[in-house]
Amino acid sequence: MFFLRLVSLLAILSLVNVHAQLTQFSQQDITILKGFTLSALPPLPVSSSNRWADDDAAAALGKRLFFDPALSANGKVSCASCHQPERYFTDGLSQSVALGLTKRSSPSIPNALYGPWQFWDGRADSLWAQALMPLEDEKEHGISRVAVAKEISENYRQAYISVFDDEKSLKLLKKIKIKNNMPPTLNTTQQQAVNQVFSRVGKAIMAYERKLVLRDSKFDLFVEELAQNNGDASVSQLYNDTEIAGLRVFIGKANCASCHNGPLFTNFEFHNIGAPEPDTKQVDFGRFAGVEELRASEFNCLSRYSDAKPEQCLEMNFLKTQGPELVGAFKTPSLRNVSETAPYMQSGQFATLEAVVAHYNSPTPPFYDREQHPSRPHFDIVPLKLTEQEQAQLVSFLKTLVSPLPTDDKWWFP
């Protein structure tokens, strides 16, 4: 009997010791964790290609444009159709639906503000260039840039002139007539005027999007609490033991932070993690195709409609354009609000966080078809080998990254 009691006592002491190890964070741990909090976010990066990026009047105009369905072929699709504020500017769909079914899901806008590349494949190098592409896409807004420019001339004239001081372009647009929604033939001067107005629509929308600010999640508050309690998480009012264990798995054994790092939990780079191919008959080449579209864009940083000097376009000047690591690679998504922005991956291949973690735990190599692929894709991950308990702990931690919706923020909602 004494032996059994001794064994029980030793077991309890062992559990207490494990719990102490779990809940005690060193000052070095806290310093590292602070680098993942929103308080570590620097000011928004300077936008050399958009000199109105931080103009309040441009942002006010951009907000009107963002929520205006008139900027679509059927008058029913706005930017907010697929980027819904109440869903952290996503739409909850595997593939977005506007005029038609798109190829990919809608990324969250607040998580994209600091990144040099936009879209899953990085085919735009600024938020303003990104905002223009869906307008002309026949499956999204399906409206011509001429029609967009005419809409500005007719219904946003004073606001546009007030922000951009560009009455000249609008005067040229008066002579352009659109019949049966068909884009007319334009001379060079008219085309440049249309492109000027069109590009500035994107720049106004970008100015609006830069006003979208995330608020502290439970994770951010927990790290602040840790610092106040000298690293003792056992007295936390915010995290339970499962969430603490999940944080340790995230930083430690799972090595998630190798790609999902910094305050937005992303390195903004491109990786092929072997997510299932949505359509094996039409392989999505990701960054490999995106980089070519980026180079050909009329509205990239090096274009005539950019406000940057060529030497300021560092990403374009040092652009990586080839290599197997680009094939099927997609941008690392931010994990901010991740539990509220399902489904996951570029085309919503996984419905739940549990499925995502299970994939990383035992990943399948990327699909390869020698008839379609330019080269065998590079595979960027290795099995995590987490136990079922560790996987569940990791998911619990990820659910603490949700920021409260800023219902009193005039910029967030229409």
Image (cartoon, rainbow, N blue to C red):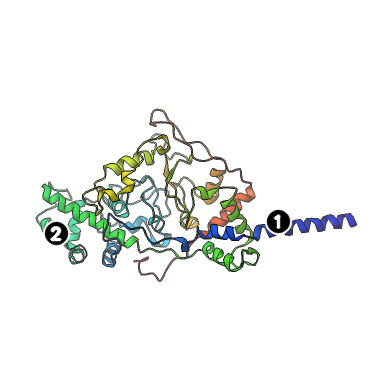
Residue 228 to residue 88: above or below: below
Taking the image as shown, residue 373 lies to the left or right of residue 18, namely left
Q: Are marks 2 and 1 in contact (CB under 8 Å)?
A: no
Frontmost of labels 2 and 1 is 1
Q: Is 87 in front, or is 128?
A: 128
Q: Identify the mark at residue 366; answer none if there is no mark.
A: none
Residue at image x 57%, y 41%?
383
Q: Determine the residue located farthest toward the top in the rendered image.
A: 371
Taking the image as shown, residue 45 lies to the left or right of residue 361, namely left
Residue at image x 45%, y 40%?
272
Q: Identify the mark at residue 170; answer none if there is no mark.
A: 2
**In the figure, residue 405 lies in which quadrant?**
bottom left
Q: Determine the residue located farthest toward the right in the rendered image.
A: 1
Q: Amino acid at mark 2?
A: Leu
Q: Is residue 261 visible?
A: yes
Q: Secondary structure at mark 1?
A: helix
Q: Secondary structure at mark 2?
A: helix
Mark 1, residue position: 18
- Check the picture and name the quadrant holding the N terminus: bottom right
Residue at image x 86%, y 55%?
4
Badge 1 density bin: few <14, some 14–19, many ≥20, Cα 10 Å: few
Work out whether mark 2 precedes mark 1 in sequence or the reverse, and give the earlier one: 1
Residue 197: image location, x then y, percent:
19, 56
Q: Amino acid at mark 1?
A: Val
Residue 25: image location, x then y, percent:
62, 60
What separation in Å lies between label 2 and label 1 (alpha carbons)? 70 Å
Residue 57: image location, x then y, percent:
26, 67
Q: Determine the residue located farthest toward the bottom in the rendered image.
A: 408
